[in-house]
Amino acid sequence: MTPENRIKSPAAIIGSRPTLLMQIMMNHIRSAKLLLLGYSCLLSGCSTSTDTASAQAPTGAPQPGAGTLSRTVSLRDLIGQGLEFNLDIKSARLEPLIAAQEVRKERAAFEPALQAATGTAYTKRPLNTRELLATGLPGTAGRDFNDGTADYSLGIVGKLSAGTQYDLSFKGNRYRNDLNENSLTSPFYPEYDSFAGLTLTQPLFRGAGVAVNMAPVNIAKASERIAVIQRSRKAEEIALDISIRYCDLSFAVGEIKVRTEAVRLAAALAADHQRRLEQGVGSNVEILEAQSAAASRTDELEVSVTRLLEVQAELCKLIGASNDASPDTMVPSSTGFLFDPPSDRAGLISSALRNRLDYRQARIGIEKQHIQIRYAQNQQWPQLDLKASCGVLGLDSSVGRAVARASSGNNPFWSVGLTLTIPLGGSEADSQVKAANLKNAQALMELQKIEQGIVIDIDSQLRILQVHRRRITSARAALELSRQRLDAEGQKMEKGTTTGFAMLEAQKDLTAARTQELSAIADFNRSAAKLAYQKGTLLQDVGFHVTE
């Protein structure tokens, strides 16, 4: 084997090409230090000078902290901003307004209307012998009879909530024909008659009663209440999403702190190995290991930064802001426990049944179906209408005189009658009743499904919270042991009784323990937020006063 084909050790490689490799590793260390500087300023609320960072960093080195400002935000502030500016909530606020117009439209069926009508007709036809004798007109059978009429009316018509239809009007007719023109017994030519009075039509079976006639209005009102609830539900959903993302934000910022500290520890260890090498008690391999760990941890830190930016972008969407409008990095005001979830199962279920908006919506849906059932059942009855009319009549040779005669009251008029309509098939009304009953059964099952889901969700979240509490306890115990191990390895390193690899492993375990604690707390907060949402008091728990 030739010397060129021999495998060289890392120490030999470093010894043969120290300038290139050491320059690469020093670049990583400088980048790690720059990341540390930037995110230390980010988390402490200051800005990093771009000029200073550029002077310290090598060409092409990343500068994530340069020019970055942090903004401390609380969960309540973010939810408040989301409730005000989130576009989904803005859209949901329009639904009750639309539903209110539907109520107004249904009420319009009971508003009075001014009704005016006019018309004219003309016929010319031959008279048979009987008609000729009846009219007393001269001539023989087959003579033409000219008949012209014109009618006009003006009145107020409408419908009452009990189903009563009213028509308060003035009606008139003009008759111009051969009979009143040529007959010696006809006092007027042309003839004008008039009627002024009131006509009422009252359903007695189908369509009778306030409940039946107000059914469309009451259904529209129920839909309006549902629209209000849906608006509030959308607000709670956005609040839950913001709470979840806030937990993600808290974890991401905490993880950056942990990763930054890990880079610092690795860089400090590399510097310590360099010092020991200069004193003749270290090795190039240990320096290489520490520098490699620093470079790897720098990459992990960048991943954490990416996660923070993604979380912030999601939060910007939820609160109705843009990254251009909000360039600052969000830093949560609290990184601990956001909620204090109760553990009383019975109280949680009772709160959910009292406050859950989807449960209220389902109950209103059942009310709508009951209204629909009563209406459909009424439509199975036969149609029996009582019609009554009263007024005064007038007849003269002009409109004014006919009206004057009618206003005198000398010619009263009244009539009363019944109209009965019985459907021979009845399949339409029966199908409406059956369909309404089936929809009501569906609504009841939906309510039962929600009740079942409330119990299951609350039981599940209570158990999950217990698991997260145990995780937090375990993670804190592991964190304390990791700190003790790192301290012990540091003391051994000072005495020269351990290796750089063991020190790096201890640092790695400490970073993992810190990350596990952050993850356990974030998961606990997420589950606590979900529990508050499932019991219907998330907005109240955050500090908002909720009214429908």
Image (tube, rainbow, N blue to C red):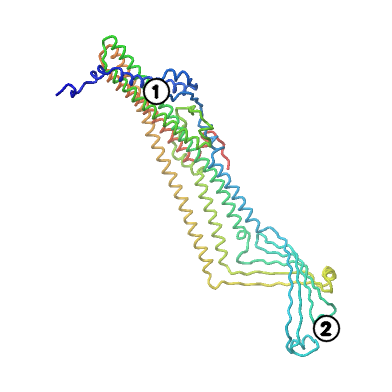
Q: Which mark is residue 260?
A: 1
Quarter containing the N terminus: top left
Amino acid carrying mark 2 in the image: Ser
| Image height of 36 relative to 115, above or below | above
Q: Is residue 423 visible?
A: yes
| Residue 166 image-quadrant placement | bottom right
| Image height of 246 relative to 285, above or below | below
Amino acid carrying mark 1 in the image: Thr
Q: Which mark is residue 183?
A: 2
Quarter containing the C terminus: top right
Secondary structure at numbered mark 1: helix
Residue drawn at 45 percent across, 53 percent down? 445
- CA–CA distance in space, label 2 to label 1: 117 Å
Secondary structure at numbered mark 2: loop
* Residues packed near mark 1 inside 10 Å, few (<14), some (14 to 19) or many (20 plus): many
Residue 19 at x, y percent in the picture: 30, 17
Q: Nearer the viewer, residue 427 or 22?
A: 22
Q: Residue furthest top?
A: 279
Q: Nearer the viewer, residue 194 or 456?
A: 194
Residue drawn at 79 percent across, 77 percent down? 176
Q: Are marks 2 and 1 in contact (CB under 8 Å)?
A: no
Q: Is residue 477 visible?
A: no
Q: Counting residues from the N terminus, which is met first, the one under dot 2 or under dot 1?
A: 2
* Residues packed near mark 2 inside 10 Å, few (<14), some (14 to 19) or many (20 plus): some
Residue drawn at 48 percent across, 20 percent down? 49
| Image height of 426 relative to 65, above or below | below
Residue 321 at x, y percent in the picture: 53, 35
| Residue 473 image-quadrant placement | top left
Horizontal arrangement in the rendering, residue 229 relative to residue 514 (left or right) = right
| Image height of 150 relative to 94, above or below | below
Residue 426 at x, y percent in the picture: 53, 70
